[in-house]
Every structure is written in structure tokens, then in C-alpha cells.
Image (cartoon, rainbow, N blue to C red):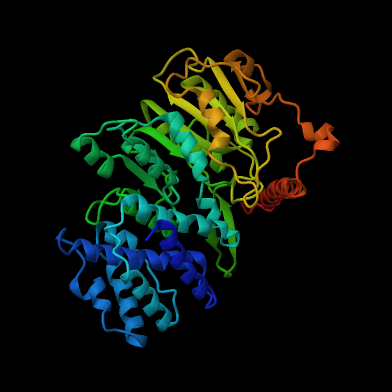
Amino acid sequence: MTTATILQRVWNYCNTLRDDGVSYGDYLEQLTYLLFLKMADEYSKPPYNRKINIPKNLNWESFKNKSGAELEAHYIKILNELGKEKGMIGEIFFKAQNKIQDPAKLYKLINLIDGENWVVLGADVKGDIYEGLLEKNAEDTKSGAGQYFTPRVLIKAMVECIRPEPKKTIADPACGTGGFFLRAYDFIADKKNYDLDKEDKDFLKFKTVTGWEIVANTARLCLMNLYLHGIGDLNSEPPIERADSLLTAPSEKFDYVLTNPPFGKKSSITISNEDGTQSKETLTYERHDFWTTTSNKQLNFVQHVRSMLKADGKAAVVVPDNVLFEGGAGETVRRRLLETTDLHTILRLPTGIFYAQGVKANVIFFDNKPASKNPWTKEVWIYDLRTNIHFTLKTQQMKFEDLKDFIDCYNPKNRFKRKETDRFKKFTYEEIAARDKTNLDIFWLKDESLGDMDNLPDPDVLALEIVENLEAGLESFKEIIESLNGKK
């Protein structure tokens, strides 16, 4: 059966459950628990005969001959008990809950999964099915799942530029559902890029990736996504830590950091007051390794990423526009980044590519360097993929081909041999340092839609851009109000 057929079957069943009020996210979670149990069961049998640390009374076989209330009670027991286990199993089932209220529907879902032999499917097939489900989940904008989903074509382009090597470590301090790890894994495993020996493959499977994810349900989906793609196994230590990665300075350094930290400028914690009301308090991270203390989450992530890198480590980070132009702490972070690292490339991203709307973002690429008296950044190359370029999530999605020219201009195999084009320009350190607040939000192309009334974009693209601008403005106003009220 093809990936598309299995994906369709699994997804069609979700539509049945939605009538009972089960959201995409909840469905995906239940599917994760059941798929994990079914695959563990397959691995415990010939020809694999692996030792699986799941008690017999809680394994896949224990579902057999149960239905109705008995099946529901048994499923709840499995979720509770396995959540107390150690390692990957305990992480997958951490605080797991049954969201399928109708035992007959649960019975049908178990049979649907039982009907396939999942282990036999290649890692790419299993992975593609799960990635397909994650993308569909992200499209459900009301649930907010889109904020954990970076467009896969953008991730692929970032990895193609960084070109991660075997036997090197890769980290993501806000890993969401694991998109950067999977693409980096695919790049290293691709025979066109490297010829891996057994030691390389072992390192790739168990030691290459390390991630942090603050939201428990998202961390669970990430672990399952990695597992289905062949990263880690049932009995290995989970490569993902369920934690706020900004809280402490990194205990280890990495060769690469690839990340798209959550959008939303302020870091905050919710405080429950004595009278039962709740308020938000601004969260600042007092870190000795940071250049400046700020409640701006984006600037904290940029500082944190730099802290995570080995002396010669490389980073590619998705950041919103405000990181490039904001004064105060923003200026401090930009100056120090230009001085202590080689901030060599900025990709100005088009609007209409993220599920979180109202976002104008960029990718910054920088290489860490040892301490030096002189600034390490000599010139910053900026690629403008935004001016006069229009995408929408529904009718005109960004494809990998749309990023090909940027990758060619970046020249991954030797980025020191680059040529300027209409969309790709270089600016010297001196030019940038002389700009007000060391502003890196630089553009030079004329916006044709402002002057050419005959060639306006499609109405749906125009409408979406208006909505995105309004939403971005609204977010800024909300932050001002919350600051004035002293709640954030």
C-alpha cells in the first residue's frame, strides 16, 4: 500500500472522530500512543526478537478480545502505567490521556492500526505518513499547532546551505515536531553527500541530535517523529528534553544549531493570585553568558544559540524582523553578534509561508569564532526573497524551487566565492556599523505593487497581506497595552 493510501485511510478516520469533538491534535496524540505500542509489538517478534521493556499486561497484545467499557478502562490503564516508565517509553506516554470518548471508535482505530505491518514499511514511508499528519495538524490554524511547524521547504534550504557533516552534533533549542533534525538526518544519510560506515550510522542514529521542547504534547510528537524516521530506538535515552531551554546556560556545546524559535516577542510566566485571578509576569533570564538582559524572547534565543555553539560551530536561525531593527537590547545583540561571530548571510523571507500569521521573518546564518580584538564579520550578504514575491498557504504555496536561487547564491560548497545579483547584495561591516542602531533590516529593491496599478497581485494575495499587516500591528498594540498594565 502506498504512503498516500495509508495516510488517506488514517486521516479519513480522523474526520469520523472530529464529529465526536476530537481535534486533529488529540487524534494525532492517540495515534502516537497506539502506533508506538503496535511497532514495539512487531519488534518483539521474529525476525527481530528485540527485548521490549513494556510489561506483558500493557502491550499491544493486551488489547485483544477487549471491547466496550473494558477496552476503554484498559487503554486508560496502559496510558497511566507506561507514563511512569523510564526512557523513550516514559517520555512518549508522559501525562498521556485518553481523548476518544466512544469505546467503539477506539476499537475501530486499534483495528485500523493492527491491520498494517508498520515495521516492514521503510523509515521514509513511516516518516512521510507521520509528517503528513503533522502538516495537516498545522493547517488547523485554530488549534495553534502551526506555531510548531516550520515550512519543510525552508528547513530543507537551510540544511542545504549549512551542509551538516557526519560525526558532528546538531541541536535545536525549540525543536517543535523535529523538522530540522529529520532534514539534517536525511542530508547526512544521503549517499550523494556522504558514504557512511557503521560507526557513522550509529552516531547518526543515537548521538547526532539533541533538542528541547517546552510543550509536553509537542515533545511527544517530536519523539515519535524521530523514532519513525529511524533516530533513536525503543530503549535508548530520548534525544529530546522537555524543558525551557533558555533557563540555564548550555552544559554542552554543539557543531550546528538549526532552529525556528517560537514567534511572540515577550517571555512571560502565568502567576495565580490569591483572589483566584491570573496575571502574566514578564520573564527575564539572568544569564552570565548573555550580552544583555531582556524580556524579548527572540533576542534571548539568538544569544542562547550563540552560547550553544562550539568555537567553530555554525548556526541558522529563523528570526522575526524586529530582531534586525529593534533598539536597546536589540542593538546590543546585533553589535555583539557582528563582533564575536561571522554573521555572513541573511535571507529575507516572503510573507504568507508560516501558519502563524502576521509574521515577517528572516533566516540569519552565522559561524562562531574564538575571542578576538577585531570584529569577525567582514561583510553581510543579504538575499531579498520578499520584495515583489507573494505566497499564500492555500493557493500559492512556496515550493523548494522558489528557494533554489538563494541556495545557488549562498554557494554552500564555498561561500567565500559569491557574486552579487539583483536580489543578493553584500554590505561591509563598516557600512552596517554606521547605520542607526546597527540596523540590519536592509532592502533595496523597488516594491512594484506600490507604483504599477496594472500589475497588482491577485486579490487573495493582497487581502492576505493586508490581514498579515493588521495582525502584526495588533500584536504590537497588545504588547504595549500589557506593558502599560504591568502584566507582562
The percent coordinates of residue 67 (x first, y second) are: 33, 85
Location of residue 306 in the rendering, given as x and y in whole percent from the top left corner? 44, 31
**As drawn, is 313 to the left or to the right of 234?**
right
Which image quarter holds the N terminus? bottom left
Residue at x-position 81% and y-position 34%: 450
Image side of residue 3 versus residue 390, left or right: left
Residue 220: % across, % down: 38, 58
Q: Is residue 333 visible?
A: no
Residue drawn at point x = 25 percent, y = 53 percent: 233
Camera sees residue 212: yes
Does residue 14 sit above or below 267 in this rendering?
Answer: below
| Residue lying farthest to the bottom in this orientation | 69
Q: How many marks?
A: 0
Quadrant in the picture for residue 274: bottom right
Q: Residue at x 43, y 79 (%)?
A: 105
Q: Nearer the viewer, residue 94 or 138?
A: 138
Seen from the viewer's position, the closer of residues 434 and 378 is 378
The image shows residue 140 at horizontal and vertical percentages of 57, 60
Residue at image point 45% right, 80% down? 101
Q: Nearer the viewer, residue 344 or 110?
A: 110
Q: Nearer the viewer, residue 458 or 75?
A: 458
Taking the image as shown, residue 197 lies to the left or right of residue 244, namely left
